[in-house]
Image (cartoon, rainbow, N blue to C red):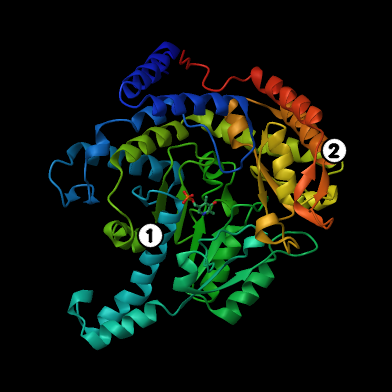
Amino acid sequence: MSSPNAESTAFRSALEVIRAVEPRVADAIGAELADQRESLKLIASENYASPATLLAMGNWFSDKYAEGTVGRRFYAGCQNVDTVEALAAEHARELFGASHAYVQPHSGIDANLVAFWAILADRVESPALKRAQVRQVNDLTEEDWFALRRELGDQRMLGMSLDAGGHLTHGFRPNISGKMFDQRSYGTDPATGLIDYDRVAEAAREFRPLILVAGYSAYPRKVNFRIMREIADSVGATFMVDMAHFAGLVAGKVFTGDFDPVPHAHIVTTTTHKSLRGPRGGMVLCGPELADQVDRGCPMVLGGPLPHVMAAKAVALAEARRPDFADYAQRIVDNAQALAEGLLRRGATLVTGGTDNHLVLIDVSGYGLTGRQAEQALLDSGIVTNRNAVPQDPNGAWYTSGIRIGTPALTTRGLGTAEMDATAELIHIVLSQTTPGSNADGTPSKAKYVLDPALADKVSRQATDLLSTYPLYPSVTLA
Ligand SMILES: *Cc1c(COP(=O)(O)O)cnc(C)c1O
């Protein structure tokens, strides 16, 4: 561990240098730290990266073009980029037990695009080239090229529905994946809220997708990836898992056996900044069959690699390989379960009735509110969450009926199960004391709400008190 003093000095010096050029940027950076320190951050997709991870991003690597892969670059002078990219990939392979890791994607969405096009290249483009007896697309006749483009655009994907917790990038129309693929989705059992694997198998048999996708942003339970792989195999689909949200739980060996996607999926994508606690970025893991295609991610779909972010990925992945990360991952789940129990005990309705991962989905219709009203009322009270659809949501994707909360960030700060119960109390007080508002013409509003400002202030102070014992970046003082 570096000394707290070194960390303070590093950030202070950086701000001093920035302030000399554009003081408003330095001020905004300082204000961001202050805001993050004060807010009870329950956003399930956010975390706090370590000082070492943050500092690895602010340097000369940002100046370097490094298209290509380690040892095979289209630009000269990439030896130091090679060092950090190779390190990040090695840490990723060791951490997840994957045979290949591609650490260039700039985000989770980019990682998914890399995976989709690697699969399309392997399963649609390569066979077409073979049929035409040519080595590369430039050698196809106009006619064969036109036919291939049509074939690439005529593939099917089966993924989890949005309101059951799936992600927009799993073939939904507003995202490019929905424009690329003919998509169908599997939902959850209305009675239990859980994935019904027999229904997934049935949908796969009927639809015969090229790609079966598992992974979620708002499903509070484990997924059995062994069963999902069997379903994929039974219809000849490529099985892809997007572990963007729960990669930290895989890394920390909370999800093992059937619940660890890496041994079961043909290809796994992730973000690096959610429960994995690294820099903002993405990553793809796969076996040898797809490795070459995955490595073509840049310039196939990605802009030039971000070597400074790959350096930070190497740092964060090294951190995730230390034994204390497994302890962190277990505490994330213990905390989510304590939060769920605290809410249930006070009468809240939870989708699936609880959690076995890092997130909890509250159905706030039980409080007579929409997700939007609940999100704003909680924000007024110093509690940062986000609204989220619940299965078969009557309020749609904008207003919603759910509030998604997650524990990776607060667990990083050091809060434990007792503080989670206190947090459940604060959430319950706010939601039970908020009432829906009405529009000017007297009709009920899905956005307006009424909450006594004095109560919101009181809860805000209690939230700050709760955090005061667990300072964020205790090693860093800017003033
Ligand atoms: C967050 C998320 C993404 C997108 O990640 P970005 O880094 O924001 O692009 C993709 N898939 C899932 C399942 C996610 O939860």
Residue bearing mark 1: 114
Q: Position of residue 59 (x, y in %)?
A: 28, 30
* Left or right, residue 372 beside residue 300: right
Q: Is residue 149 above or below residue 297?
A: below
Q: Quadrant of residue 266?
A: bottom left
Q: Quadrant of residue 168?
A: bottom right
Question: Which of 285 and 73 lies nearest the eye of the viewer?
Answer: 73
Q: Is residue 467 visible?
A: yes
Q: Position of residue 197 (x, y in %)?
A: 66, 66
Q: What's under tag 2, amino acid-wise?
A: Gln
Q: Please tell me which of labels 1 and 2 falls first in the chain.
A: 1
Q: Is residue 419 above or below residue 444?
A: above
Looking at the rendered structure, the secondary structure element under dot 2 is helix
Residue bearing mark 2: 433
Q: What's under tag 1, amino acid-wise?
A: Val
Crowd around label 2: few <14 · some 14–19 · many ≥20 (10 Å):
some
Q: Position of residue 212 (x, y in %)?
A: 52, 68
Question: Which of 475 and 460 lies nearest the eye of the viewer?
Answer: 460
Residue at position x 55%, y 47% in the image: 245
Residue at position x 61%, y 40% in the image: 43
State the quadrant of the N terminus: top left
* Left or right, residue 38 beside residue 432: left
Q: Position of residue 462 (x, y in %)?
A: 74, 23
